[in-house]
Image (spheres, rainbow, N blue to C red):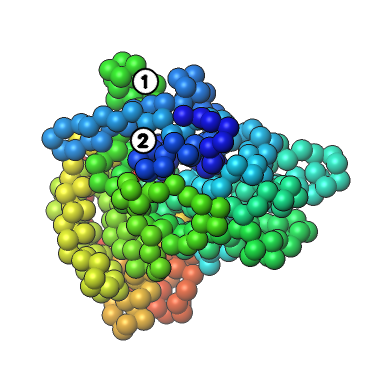
Amino acid sequence: MSTSEAARIVHIGLGAFSRSHLAYYTQRASDASEWEIIAYTGRSRELADVLEAQGCTYHLIERAAAEDRIMPISSIVRARPGSEVSQLVADIADPRTRIVSLTVTEAAYHLTGSGTLNLQAPDIAHDLEVVQRVHEGVARSADLRTAVGKLATGLLARRAEESGPVTVVSCDNMPDNGERIRDAVLAFAGAAGTDLHTWIAEHVSFVSTSVDRITPRLGAEEKQRLEVAHHDKAVVVAEPFTDWVLEGKFPAGRPRWEDAGARFVNDLAPWESRKLWLLNGAHTILASLGLLRGHTNVHEAISDSECLEAVNSFWDEAARHLPEELDVPAYRQALIERFSNPRIEHRLAQIAQDSDIKAQMRILPVAQREIAAGRRAEGAARALAVCVAAHRYGGVEWPTLGPQVMGGAAQGGVPELHALWGGPAPSEVEQVVRHALDVLSLLPVSRG
Ligand SMILES: NC(=O)c1ccc[n+]([C@@H]2O[C@H](COP(=O)([O-])OP(=O)(O)OC[C@H]3O[C@@H](n4cnc5c(N)ncnc54)[C@H](O)[C@@H]3O)[C@@H](O)[C@H]2O)c1
Ligand SMILES: O=P(O)(O)OC[C@@H](O)[C@@H](O)[C@H](O)[C@H](O)CO
């Protein structure tokens, strides 16, 4: 319930996931009545309009293989389109705001391969120009496009209004997500002519998190069916499993998310690697190879022995770089069951979006660790090769694809693999590319 005294979480990137995760944990905290979420979409307006028209409440359906559990959610009190930048900036600067959270997709951070803000990215360059023109009095911050630009501008306004400390929480599937958004904000502010280092060090905490709950985008038919059944145009469907691991301080307070199962740890890195490599890495492999092999959903792809084998050989390599205490065998077993849930329609095409950026964060680190340990990284190499193949040749039948990929190898490897790799010496890249292509050529494609 909205009260003017409630502490606020300003969320950027209202979508399916923030509604199955952040809103769920906040609603289930024992001090939920003291908190409210004001949510902005990243850029589209439809969901904000739909939610506002129904009082921002909606149903979360936890969909198990056997049955549904339905939960009304009401922790969001305002839903606005990301285009309302002036209001978003004012909300970030408002002293009632204690947390700013994000789920805007990995691509929205506009990072280079090494994790720094890409100041040349067209949308970032656009926003830097807007900030410059705002200083000159000839533009409004309302014209900002990127989450980084909006967040940096909101924090600048908070500094000007002396509204006190605040915590930024990234819930996007990226390693070191808190550190990356902090560095991106500092780089953006610096490029815009403002040094925020000292103020941020004293007033803003950037918390890193690992978020885990499969929440697919609904297909049109299912959306319509659920709308009729629940009189709700904004139903969210997620798997029953959920996990949230967080590292960092909350100087302005936070909801008691631990009451809903969240875990606060001193070192997020192993949790994050387990989740990003095993779950998201496997998703990226399934999306690439599964689409090439004619599948539509995750549960179909995981039941294909070729896909399962590709996932398992990548997992075997990843597991060597994860601590025993995290019980990787149990997590792997649980993942197979989660992926196999036939009532979760998680479309491979959705997961395959921006798969080049995702592969850099989910698969490449395992390949690099394996090579550093003197091994051939066969599973990771095959995974990277299928990502590149799907990215480059998606929709093309294998008989055409095979010779094209092999032709690329003859010319010194697939250029996208080189671009993806970024790290080790070229000879190692060649070795992995060749091996990956050998493996690829052994993968028969069954369609229809
Ligand atoms: N869906 C899941 O299962 C899941 C699980 C864990 C983490 N996540 C994280 O949450 C993110 C969002 O997932 P979702 O299911 O809510 O997706 P969604 O498509 O339902 O919502 C995405 C949100 O991000 C915004 N956005 C997209 N591209 C953007 C861009 N370039 N710049 C600014 N905003 C942009 C959209 O406007 C929307 O508000 C994922 O990319 C991932 O990082 C999702
Ligand atoms: O959301 P993305 O696009 O980063 O990745 C697609 C899926 O791998 C992802 O959404 C998983 O379902 C999720 O990370 C599970 O917790």
Outermost residue to the bottom: 374
| Residue 281 relative to residue 324: left or right | right
Which residue occupies 37% across, 43% down?
29
> Dot 2: within a 10 Å radius of its alpha carbon, few (fewer than 14), some, or many (20 or more) residues?
some
- At 78% from the left and 59% from the top, the residue drawn is 193
Q: Is mark 2 within 8 Å of ligand 1?
A: yes
Tell me residue 335's x, y (percent).
Answer: 21, 53
Label 1 crowd (10 A; few <14 / some 14-19 / many >=20): some
In depth, the one of 230 and 28 nearer the eye is 28
Disc number placed over residue 232 in the picture, else none: 1
Q: Secondary structure at mark 1?
A: loop
Q: Nearer the viewer, residue 155 or 304?
A: 155
Question: Residue at 73% across / 40% down in the picture?
Answer: 141
Disc on the earlier residue, 2 or 1 = 2
Above or below, 60 relative to 318? above
Q: Is residue 362 above or below residue 354?
A: below
- Under mark 2, the amino acid is Arg
Amino acid type at circle 1 is: Asp
Q: Determine which of the numbered discs, if any, sits on residue 217 in the image.
A: 2
Q: Nearer the viewer, residue 350 or 153?
A: 153
Residue at 40% across / 69% down in the picture? 267
